[in-house]
Amino acid sequence: MTLFLNGVEQLLRRKIVLTAAIATVAFLGLYWWGVSAASSVDITMGHDKADMAVGMLGPADAALAAIITAGPLAATLVTALIIVIGSTMLPEEIEQGRMPFWLSLPQSRLKVYLSTGLAPLAVSYCLSLILFGGIFIITKIYFPFAPRNLFLVLISMLAWLTVTWAAVMLLSLVVKKIAAMLIAFFLAAVASLFGGLHEIVRMFPGDAPEVLVSITNTVIYAFPADRGYRGVIYGLIPGDAVITENLAFFGVSASVPPLHLIYAFVWSILLLSIGYLKFRKMDF
Amino acid sequence: MEKEHIIEVENVSKSFRKVKALVDFSLGISSGTIFSLLGPNGAGKTTLMKILLGLVRSDSGSGSVHIFGLPVTSSLSRSGVRYLPESVSFPSWATPIVLFRQLERIRHESSIDDFQLRCKELECDSLMKRPVGKMSRGQRQRVALALVTSGKPELVLLDEPSSGLDPGGRILVRNLTGNLASEGSTVLINSHLLGEVERVCDTAAFISKGKLIAEGELDTLSRQTGMGYVETANAEEMKLSLENSGYSCRLEAKGVVAKLPDPDAFRAMANSVLDTGIAFTGINQMRESLEDVFLRIMDSEREDDIVS
């Protein structure tokens, strides 16, 4: 806990975290401006058939559109932050010669490993809460809606970030930090792409090509970060929207099964354990 | 009565790929001593220090290392133990107060008053609220020393503690080391500044190529040089007089060095000095400096290597 506090204290002084915080505020500011501007436009005007369909939509559908648009952008910011600070935390302590200092104190290596590494996860989770919480509150102010499952949002967010964090922690101990960042970004991008395809495949059970099903299943199990992200979006979107069909094209077709989230946590623990085995054997 | 060993190293080896850093190394360090590890670069001194702290793992099955009777694999063996690495770079934004708070969150061994006292002793008490990034290298080293030694540590391991310090700073480090020992701490120093080491250490171990070459109290390690030194303002005159008495002499700063025919001839030489009637301010039998001991031991080790 104590070294964790030291890590958080140190992270909060870093420019990358300050930049991410400023970007969060700027993003939420722009989102507020955009949503407030959209709320003053009457989209139900018109007389033809298409306009009549639009007329059936309620504020919750506008909220759905707003969240589906803002979600991926917010996710990119959070993913970038956790990858950058997660991949530099341990290597920088080692490179700057501080690791021998911490390890010479009366505490175990496991404690040093976890508490130093935990700080990026905590900071990223807080930032993610602010970002997605901000999106939720701003949207709700202008387009009243009832989210599907806020508890799922909290758990899925943790699963999503924990997977990314565990992967980047391990990578940072195995390869150089720039390489660790690039590999982690690549994994996140691939997981996001196939995670989206997986949602479409889920919408047409039995119709999708076998190869695609196999690939998407392999990817979501090999790097389960995307399942967490889909859970965040699914939990956040309105449950009272008129649009309930073809949600897969917005990136979510149904809730994330709890087993997928449990799997994501177990997967993270496995990666963290491998990272710890490597860290335990390192000479400083 | 022999003091209890606070550090016990028995038959430890460590290799970094093909490089043998320590070879079947054994050493015991008594509590309350100021012990120095001496040896050329790459001898294995820093590796030994790191093994003592569990920072570097000895080769498996190659003996044991205990501190306070506890194996170094246990984090408990590091209670009351402080370590200053050869180079440590603190976050540039952090002030000494912040760094002390961060350390004490973990070790719970000293108070802010202890830290301020140590800062005062190392003449860095005016830097308490200055970020480390705005300090000179010497100032940072003083702060690091104060952080490491605040309170009453039982064992202090210092790797090149005078690094980056001006002569004034070195004197402060010397005094600090003496004070730590007088407060009951055991101090283990790894330094290339033999002059500094000689002034503060009781005991030393000479290491070369990962092996312990010699170990003991500095007095027992240094030999008589077979020379006598006379401190005088009339060095030329004294030299001539002693040469007339049959001594082979040479001039040195502020005096004359005379070669003794045998180690027991010092008294006779002193009488000869008195007989000259020339004023002098001191006379002593010369012993090897630590530098001489170091060079002698390392030379003999080199010769042994060639023979074998």
Image: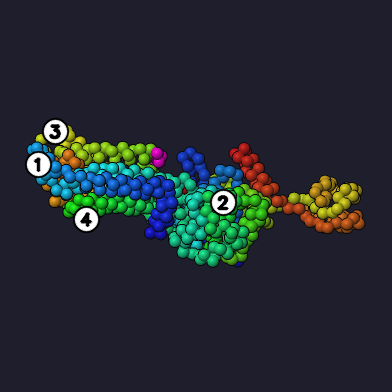
Disc 1 on helix, strand or loop? helix
Rate crowding at label 4 as few (under 14), some (14 to 19) or many (20 or more) other CA atoms within 10 Å. few
Disc 4 on helix, strand or loop? helix
The residues tagged by marks 2 and 3 sit, at their Cα atoms, a distance apart of 65 Å
Q: Amino acid at mark 4?
A: Phe
Is A256 positioned to the left or the right of B91 in the image? Answer: left
Q: Are marks 2 and 3 on the same chain?
A: no
The residues tagged by marks 3 and 1 sit, at their Cα atoms, a distance apart of 37 Å
Q: Chain of mark 3?
A: A
Q: Which residue range is magenta in the image?
A: A174-178
Is A63 positioned to the left or the right of B261 in the image? Answer: left
Q: Chain of mark 1?
A: A
Q: Name above or below for residue B110 compared with residue A166.
A: below
Q: Nearer the viewer, residue A247 or B277?
A: A247
Residue A1 image point, x, y percent: 38, 59
Does residue B66 appear anywhere in the picture?
Answer: no
Q: Chain of mark 4?
A: A
Q: Which mark is residue A209?
A: 3
Name the residue carrying label 4: A151
Instruction: Give me the residue at 50% from left, 50% from top.
Output: B92
Q: Are marks 3 and 4 on the same chain?
A: yes
